Image (cartoon, helix red, strand yellow):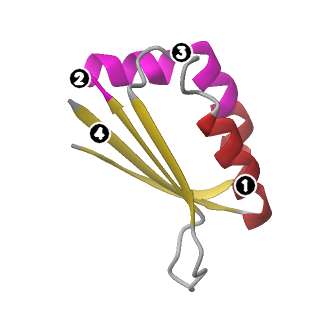
Amino acid sequence: MLTHVVVMKFTDPADAPEAKARLSALLGVVPQIHTIQVELDTLRTEVSYDLLVMTTHDDADGLRGYQQHEAHMELAGWLRPRLATRAVVDF
């Protein structure tokens, strides 16, 4: 099992709730996603990121399949211009 974690900071934090809804909607659409958890930051400190998404996959090939899936690519096209930065950890 491979867990994929991404934290995102938006140029406009008001985009984070829409991103959460769009990311959550991938479950059941992208077959390589076993589980997905999407959370918004609540404390909003100066070092906080706005959103966390954590997905699980069978393995690295499953993660790549998710990343290359049409629904994920469409979402990424919406997300990327709105992001100030992001960080990823896969384990």
Residue in the image at 61% along x and 14% along y: 70
**Nearer the observer, disc 4 or disc 3?**
4
Circle 3: residue type: His
Identify the secondary structure beneath mark 3: loop
Report, in whole angstroms, how far the alpha carbon at label 1 lies from the one at label 4: 22 Å
- Residue 88 is situated, as x and y percent measured from the top left of the image, at 38, 49
Q: Please name the amino acid that badge 1 sits on.
A: Pro
Any mark on residue 69, and which?
Answer: 3
Q: CA distance from mark 2 to mark 4?
A: 9 Å
Image quarter of residue 10: bottom right
Mark 4 vs 3, N-terminal side: 4
Disc 2 secondary structure class:
loop
Could you tell which of marks 2 and 4 lies nearer the N-terminus? 4
Q: Earlier in the sequence, mark 3 or mark 2?
A: 2
Residue 17: mark in rendering: 1
Amino acid found under the numbered disc labelled 2: Asp
47 up-or-down from 1: above or below: below
Residue 11 covered by magenta stretch: no
The residue identified by callout 4 is: 3
Magenta span contains residue 68? yes
Which segment is the magenta one? 57-75
Nearer to us of marks 1 and 2 is 1
Q: Quadrant of the N terminus?
A: top left
Residue under the image location 69 percent in, 24 percent down: 74
